[in-house]
Image (tube, rainbow, N blue to C red):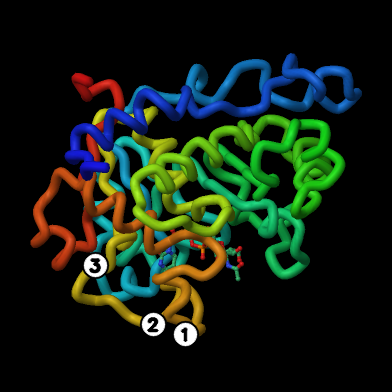
Amino acid sequence: RPKLTSLQLLCQFKDRVDKVSTLTSDLQPFSALPWAVQLPPDPLTSDLGPFGSCAVVSSAGSLRYSGLGKEIDSHDAVLRFNAAPTAGYEKDVGSKTTIRLINSQVMASDDHRFLSSSLYSSGVLVAWDPAPYSADLMQWYNRTDYPIFTQYQRYRRLHPLQPFYILHPHFQWQVWQRIQDNMAEPIQKNPPSSGLLGTILMMSLCEVVHVYEFLPSRRKTELCHYYQRFYDAACTLGAYHPLLYEKNLVKRMNQGSDRDIYTHGRVTLPGFTQLNC
Ligand code: NCC
């Protein structure tokens, strides 16, 4: 099978990953449940954007001492992940947070104090759970990886005005399929990392997307996160998530220069509306 060009790859994502879908209050089987009214009536993509320029800020340790804060904040919208803070790290990662993409582990674990920590209470929240491959929604509901739904309901009661979406598991598996179809060998059947999911999400909301330190710069380090003194190369290379394959694909789609990656850890991707497929 011939390797796709950069544009062909981008177009595959545009055409085959249908509008980033999120759970809405009218979606079956959830619509029958009493708490479904807490879900947004409309999907994320009809409520948010379109934005001009967007930044996706990975949580990589190589952001430390990057001095990228001002550049990151100059974007119209900024996406961050999980428990990644800005307070105390503004110089390197900026302070603007438009969207925070969180996995269900963050919502459930006690250390993250998801319900009470102010880290989560600004911007738009988007959560996802590593639901099993192609399981129907009721099967997922009854057997989520972490208790995403109970935590969602609790959070919504405490912060009823903050926009909060849940990704449809179909989305992560469509993204996974794009990775698999473009790799010669079988990859692990675990969902893509939040990093790639957030990148594709922003490509559907923005004209141009800059992703920071997903492809490591010259600052590449074993420091896992810029905000924690914890060292593990698997954070950058992957273990559970097919992270190395994700990075390979993003490298192939990059419209910026290799120099940008080396100096800024910066990848440039076009928004889907900008593509002529
Ligand atoms: O580490 P995590 O991701 O929160 O990082 C967000 C995204 O940044 C990219 N990244 C991160 C570190 C690094 N050195 N290089 C990187 O490229 C990745 O794309 C990553 O997705 C996740 O994907 O949700 C993940 O979440 C953590 C953890 O659950 C949260 O941080 C909350 O503590 C996972 N770690 C563990 O389960 C121990 C991680 O595997 C994936």
Q: Label 2 vs label 1: CA separation?
A: 5 Å
What residue is shown with label 2?
222
Question: Percent from the top left, x then y, of residue 25?
Answer: 74, 19
Q: Which of 96 and 204 is in front in this view?
A: 204
Q: Is residue 176 left or right of residue 76?
A: right
State the mark number for residue 67. Answer: 3
Question: Percent from the top left, x then y, of residue 198?
Answer: 45, 44
Residue type highlighted by circle 2: Glu
Could you tell me if the residues under marks 2 and 1 are in contact, i.e. CB atoms within 8 Å?
Answer: yes
Q: Label 1 vs label 3: CA separation?
A: 21 Å
What residue is shown with label 1?
231
Looking at the image, residue 33 lies above or below residue 91: above
Residue type highlighted by circle 3: Gly
Residue at image position (69%, 46%) is 132
Residue at image position (57%, 61%) is 83
- Which of the marked residues, 3 or 2, is nearer the chain's N terminus? 3
Residue at image position (34%, 46%) is 182
